[in-house]
Amino acid sequence: MSGHLAVVGLGPGDARCLTAEAQAALVGADALYGYIRYLERVPERAGQSRHASDNRQEGARAAAALAAAAAGARVALVSGGDPGVFAMAAAVCEEIAAGPDEWRDLDVAIVPGVTAMLAVAARVGAPLGHDFCALSLSDNLKSWKTIERRLDAAAGAGFVLALYNPISRARPWQLGRAFERLRGQLPPETPVVFGRAVARGDEAIAVTTLDAADPGSADMATLIIVGSRETHVIARPRRAPLVYTSRSARGAA
Ligand code: SAH
């Protein structure tokens, strides 16, 4: 089969965060597929077709990209951040698993990108400098009970948490409940970072504590990092504070 599908991570926003490999995959494609907001970030190129879709149709978008590749096109399916983190690479694998046998013969490449938690962490120091885990707070694809169990287990085991999909119009209360849950496990002064629209024009970064963390400060474009007992803040009178997670767990139980 001559077609090719690249699932390409665009990074958090700014084109400077795009890897050279991702850039080459975008330039080499005959057809671009993706959520409209992400496609808008890719410069137009003559001879390249564009197939924008709505944010919610991940399975259908992956299937359409696979069908185009199976028909012989060089397809790039774009994703924000990294395509393997709560994004299109898993949707493509799910469609291949359930789809026609010929899709298993396709040349598929996953091209990594800078994921939101790394971009946010880099803005404030090194909060992911030791053991951490990433959780999506969206209960669209899993139950809220499962999310609470994972929050308890992760915080209880001393992991720093990177929270993706913290809040949306359809999911207004989940983040508040998550903070309440974490307050039952962690000290009130635990550092919390809100990183909004990192590497985009309207970027905003805030460092606060678990006690003071306000769910109203987050939106769909926010990634939240909740520290562990090893996460500290260095106050700097003339510069923004530095947040880091110590690599030696001296204080751990
Ligand atoms: N594949 C993406 C994540 C998709 S889930 C990645 O690797 O980054 C969407 C969530 O990612 C958002 O709700 C938000 O939590 C986070 N996110 C994506 N881009 C972001 C950015 N520029 N700044 C902060 N958070 C971002």
Image (tube, rainbow, N blue to C red):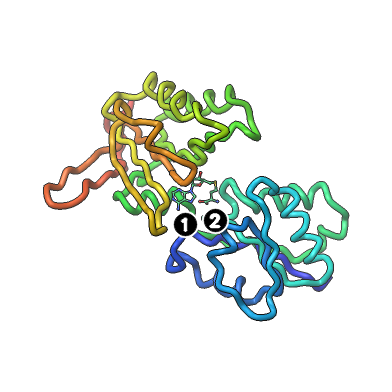
Q: Residue at 29% across / 50% down in the picture?
A: 125
Q: In the image, is residue 142 above or below residue 23?
A: above
Alpha-carbon distance for marks 1 and 2?
Answer: 6 Å
Percent x, y of residue 225: 39, 40
Specify few, some or many for label 2: CA neighbours under 10 Å numbering under 14, 14-19, or 20 or more. Answer: many
Mark 2 residue type: Gly
User: Which label sits on residue 12?
Assistant: 1
Q: Are marks 1 and 2 in contact (CB under 8 Å)?
A: yes
Q: Position of residue 120 (x, y in %)?
A: 38, 50
- Residue assigned mark 2: 80
Query: Which comes before the other along the chain, label 1 or label 2?
Result: 1
Write the residue at 37% across / 49% down: 121
Name the kind of residue labelled 1 in the image.
Pro
The C terminus appears in which quarter of the rendering? top left
State the image quarter where residue 24 is shown.
Answer: bottom right
Q: Is mark 1 within 8 Å of ligand 1?
A: yes
Q: Is residue 184 above or below residue 107?
A: above
Q: Residue 222's quadrant in the figure?
A: top left
> In which quadrant is the N terminus drawn?
bottom right
| Of the pair 45 and 191, the residue shown nearer to us | 45
Secondary structure type for disc 2 = loop
Q: Is mark 2 within 8 Å of ligand 1?
A: yes
In this rendering, the count of numbered labels is: 2
